[in-house]
Image (cartoon, grey):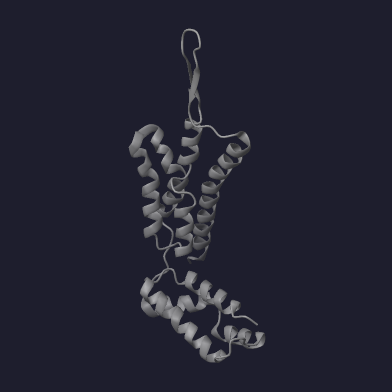
Amino acid sequence: MTREPVEAYLEQLGKELSDLPSRQRRELVAEIRDHIDQALGSGPDPREVDVRNVLEQLGDPADIAEEARQRFGVKRAAPTWTDWLAVFLLPFGGLFLLVLGTFGVLGWVVGAILLTVSRVWSPRDKMIGLLLFPGGLLLPLVMLIARTSVCTSGTGPGSVTTCSGFTLPPILGIPLLIVLVATPLTVAVYLAKKLRARTDQIP
């Protein structure tokens, strides 16, 4: 049996400890990992029953995280209005470009900052929110604007018609546009569900 259940357990523990400062979180996860390694011995392929027993004795990662918060005097972070604002700005903040010009791009930047400093989401959630896709719906908007072709014709014999503008064949452009629109919206829904779940966990 591989140690995949152990890694999955530690990953879940890390998520549950997202309220703690990073140093304390790393130390606690390392402490639990050492405990598991000692309990399973040095063999590279522990038996399934041994892994299950060790993890069951440790208990639910959420319970370990709650004990750690009490030990360090850390109150479980509750979602705030700035967290919900980040969920809105990440997909839609870039569209402020339409009314504020270049400064409109700051809409997405503010959302990214709010996401980064939040104590609610895990590091993995933050990476998803920041990387898929930077700018939110701004990029597909720019694609729609830029793909409009402007054609001009010369005068006189032998005149040539020239067109400017970014275009893609429909077989490529349409699927790409769908992905660029759907991805930031899906990420926003994912982050919102995380906030809702956290809200339900706060007594």
Residue 147 in sight in this render:
yes
Residue 122 in sight in this render:
no
Relative to 6, say whether 186 is above or below: above
Across and down, in percent, residue 44 comes to 58, 87
* Quadrant where the image shows the N terminus: bottom right
Across and down, in percent, residue 163 comes to 49, 23
Relative to 9, say whether 171 is above or below: above
Is 150 placed left or right of 104 in the picture? right
Is 58 placed left or right of 50 in the picture? left
Across and down, in percent, residue 155 comes to 46, 9
Q: Residue at x 44, y 64 (%)?
A: 123
Please tell me which residue lies in front, 34 or 16: 34
The number of discs equals 0
Q: Residue at x 62, y 86 (%)?
A: 45
In the displayed orientation, state which residue is furthest to the left: 103
Across and down, in percent, residue 107 comes to 38, 43
Image quarter of residue 119? bottom left
Q: Residue at x 49, y 21 (%)?
A: 162
Relative to 155, say whether 192 is above or below: below
Please tell me which residue lies in front, 154 or 142: 154
Is 65 placed left or right of 1 in the picture? left
In the displayed orientation, state which residue is furthest to the top: 156
Relative to 143, say whether 164 is above or below: above
